Image (cartoon, grey):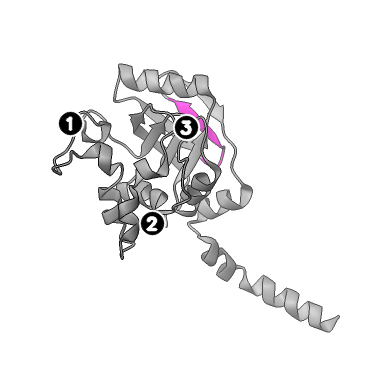
Amino acid sequence: MKQKFDTITSTCVPLPLENVDTDQIIPARFLKATTREERFFGDNLFRDWRYRADGTPNPDFVLNNPAYSGSILVAGKNFGSGSSREHAAWAIAGYGFRVVISSFFADIHRNNELNNFVLPVMVSEPFLQEIFDSIAADPGTQVCVDLPRQTVTNLATGHSETFTINGYKKYCLMNGLDDIDFLVANQHKTIAWENEDKIR
């Protein structure tokens, strides 16, 4: 979903597991889907952890715990490893997450999130653990992610860290543009350059 991104303050859903791969985020059988509908992929996010074999919700999985909600997913180290399937980012966005915080992302998945208007925020491992600890102590803990300033703040402690992001992707997120939108918006520059080149 194309949404302009500025600052988000939200409660969080904690997933303190390392090496969560894209097959766990969205199982391979859903890659055969003939729809791109966000609701479909969001409903099947973490499908095999979220539901039992008979299709009933697994009460032990965090997405089925009413104590946790929000537009920020806080995940363990090495999130999104495995295959390069973009469907994993579709599922995260389709569920309603706008931000994923981790201490490390697989590169391809990180870029897929950015391309689907989900902001991957990489923090230090001690700060990630602090956020997990704050959420464990109080599920109502809020985190503020400020894209213009590139900061993430644990409002329970007041501690902040800065994060890095590609300048082009930051511009696109803040303006609600995908790659095609950006090219169309700058088409006049391309035409001007081509005309200038012809004059030479």
Pointer 3 or 2: first along the chain:
2
First to last magenta residue range: 147-154
Q: What is the C-alpha distance between the residues marked 3 and 1?
A: 24 Å
Q: Quadrant of residue 1?
A: bottom left
| Above or below for 167 versus 144 | below
Q: Residue furthest right?
A: 200
The residue nearer to you, when weighing 81 against 129, is: 81
| Above or below for 137 versus 165 | above
Q: Which residue is mark 2?
A: 1
Quarter of the C terminus within the rendering? bottom right
In this rendering, the label closer to the viewer, 3 or 1: 1
In this rendering, the label closer to the viewer, 1 or 2: 1
| Above or below for 86 versus 15 | below
Pointer 1 or 2: first along the chain:
2
The residue nearer to you, when weighing 39 against 164, is: 39
The circle on residue 59 is 1
Q: Residues within 10 Å of mark 3 (few under 14, many from 20)?
A: many
Question: Of the residues shown, which amino acid type is indicated by label 3?
Answer: Ser
Residue 97 visible in the shown view? no
Q: Residues within 10 Å of mark 1 (few under 14, many from 20)?
A: some
Q: Position of residue 66 (x, y in %)?
A: 20, 31
| Above or below for 172 versus 145 | below
Question: Of the residues shown, which amino acid type is indicated by label 1?
Answer: Pro
Q: Which residue is painted at 40% across and 32% down in the image? A: 74
Q: Secondary structure at mark 3?
A: strand
Q: Which residue is mark 3?
A: 102
Q: What is the C-alpha distance between the residues marked 1 and 2?
A: 29 Å
